[in-house]
Amino acid sequence: MVTLEGWVDVMDTAMEATPFAWIYFVSFVLIGTFVVLNLFIAVVINNLEQSKVEQLQELDQPTTHHDVLEELERTRKALRDLQTKIARLPAGR
């Protein structure tokens, strides 16, 4: 019933025996749906928090002098490539 699959049929059968059975079924479905939805949200929030912690740990890694020099060289190369492309453009552009 928590999956909401065929709970109306079960409720109709119980209603034949006890007219106030609908109170139990409606409250069970509401509470069950609430619990399942909260579990789903908890899993999503937990995964987001774990991802955030992993990203923060990556950012906390100390940057070495060598890493900075490599990044600087990649930037210089990208600028040289861009200057070459700009130089090849026709003068009218």
Image (spheres, rainbow, N blue to C red):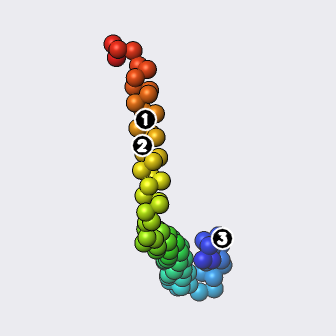
Q: Find out whether the residues at labels 3 and 2 contact each other: C-beta distance under 8 Å.
A: no
Q: CA distance from mark 3 to mark 1?
A: 68 Å
State the image coordinates of residue 68 (x, y, percent, origin top left).
Answer: 42, 58
| Circle 3 or circle 2, nearest the eye | 2
Amino acid type at circle 1 is: Arg
Amino acid type at circle 2 is: Arg
Closer to the camera in the image, 41 or 47: 47
Residue occupying image coordinates x 65% and y 70%: 5
Extreme residue in the left direction = 92
- Label 1 Cα crowd, 10 Å radius (few <14 / some 14-19 / many 20+): few
Quadrant of the rendering where the C terminus is positioned: top left
Closer to the camera in the image, 73 or 4: 73
Q: Which mark is on residue 6?
A: 3
The quadrant in which residue 60 appears is bottom left
Ranked by sequence position, the earlier of labels 3 and 2 is 3
Q: Is residue 16 visible?
A: no
Amino acid type at circle 3 is: Gly
Secondary element at tag 3: loop
Relative side of 56 to 25, left or right: left
Q: CA distance from mark 3 to mark 2?
A: 66 Å
Q: Which mark is on residue 76?
A: 2
| Circle 3 or circle 1, nearest the eye | 1
Secondary element at tag 2: helix
Q: Find out whether the residues at labels 3 and 1 contact each other: C-beta distance under 8 Å.
A: no
